[in-house]
Amino acid sequence: MEETAEHVMNSDELTPLIAQYVVNVRERTGSYYGWRTISEALVGESPASVSNPLPDIDGYGFLAGLCTRDEVSNMIFELEAKDVVRVGKDTRIRPGANIRELLPDYRGWFPRPLRAAERYAESHGHGEDRKESGCAVSWSGLRAVPATDQEIDDMRTIIEFVNEEMRVIGHGYGKGNTIKALRGERRKDVVAAGLIDLDGYGSLKGCEYRYIRRLLQTLIEAKVLRYGKYSTIMPSKERDVAIVPDCLDWVVDEREFNQRMDERADAIARGGR
């Protein structure tokens, strides 16, 4: 009797499939998901629900029968060690600086290499010492400055939460409730809106309200997000989900933004607009 050799895929063959699924999820939903959720989806164990889009995305269940969920998780951490992907504090998987080593045709956003990011932080800092960006900001003449990696990451978190509002609830909410939910506040209006049940609730817990408000204003200026009816936050008119453009590496200047917010607060206190 002839023996047939069965080909067993090794991790080097499987890891590109993992990276590609992360990219597919982002392109279809505008969001990144946690490593546990991605591991479940790749082995076909993601729970079925109306609000869960993962089973309908190319690559779902592709590793079912080839490896366990824990083995997929271990491969994700191997990719993280090589900076092919990065797992943030919120456990969500994002492209790393070396993503193109596995996916040469990848054209989306990926972070600066770690050493370059460190040099950037040393030269620009996190506040008023940063050099002025070449990008002009239209909102009341506020200037833009280069964004730190943390600010870029936090802007992506804001976008993911707005996309989650649209996907699960069907519409966006105003900047006040959106920021409160991102900060993990349990105000009556936030609870009544169902925002505490969304993936991403509290993902910017510990961040100041004005910090998130400034990043949100940057996304509005960049036309990644827009104000809809009743001043709700929504994706741009051209898209069903919001996605950060590769060129968005700037933010509204913190000092000028805070000064403008103080002026508006004083005007309201005096009875003006």
Image (cartoon, grey):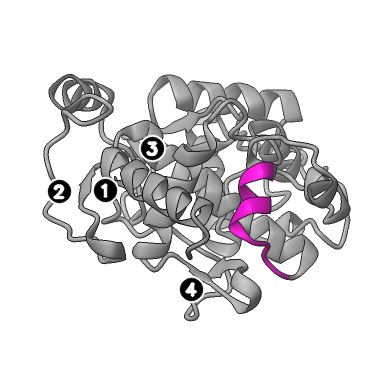
Query: What residue type is disc 1 on?
Result: Trp
Q: Quadrant of residue 201?
A: top right
Instruction: Tell me the kind of residue under disc 3.
Output: Glu
Tell me the CA gap for discs 4 and 2: 23 Å
- Is residue 257 something that shows in the picture? yes
In the rendered view, does 107 fall on the left or right side of 51? Answer: left
Which residue does the numbered mark 1 point to in the structure image? 250
The answer to the question of whether label 1 and label 2 lie on touching residues, with beta carbons closer than 8 A, is yes
- Residue in the foreground of this view, choosing between 218 and 46: 218
Q: Quadrant of residue 77?
A: top right
Could you tell me which residue is drawn at 50 percent across and 21 percent down?
78
Q: Would you call the spot at circle 2 few (<14 residues within 10 Å), some (14-19), or many (20 or more)?
A: some
Judging by the rendered image, the residue that carries numbered circle 3 is 151
Horizontal side of residue 80 vs 1, given as left or right:
left
- Report if the CB atoms under discs 2 and 3 are less than 8 Å apart: no
- Is 73 rendered above or below residue 188? above
First-in-chain label (4 vs 1): 4
| Main SS, magenta residues | helix
Closer to the chain start, of discs 1 and 3, is 3
Residue 44 x %, y %: 79, 46
SS at circle 1: strand
- In the picture of the structure, the residue carrying the numbered disc 4 is 236
Q: Is residue 235 left or right of residue 65?
A: left
At label 4, counting other C-alpha atoms closer than 10 Å, the crowd grade (few under 14, some 14-19, many 20 or more) is some
Foreground pick, 159 / 132? 132
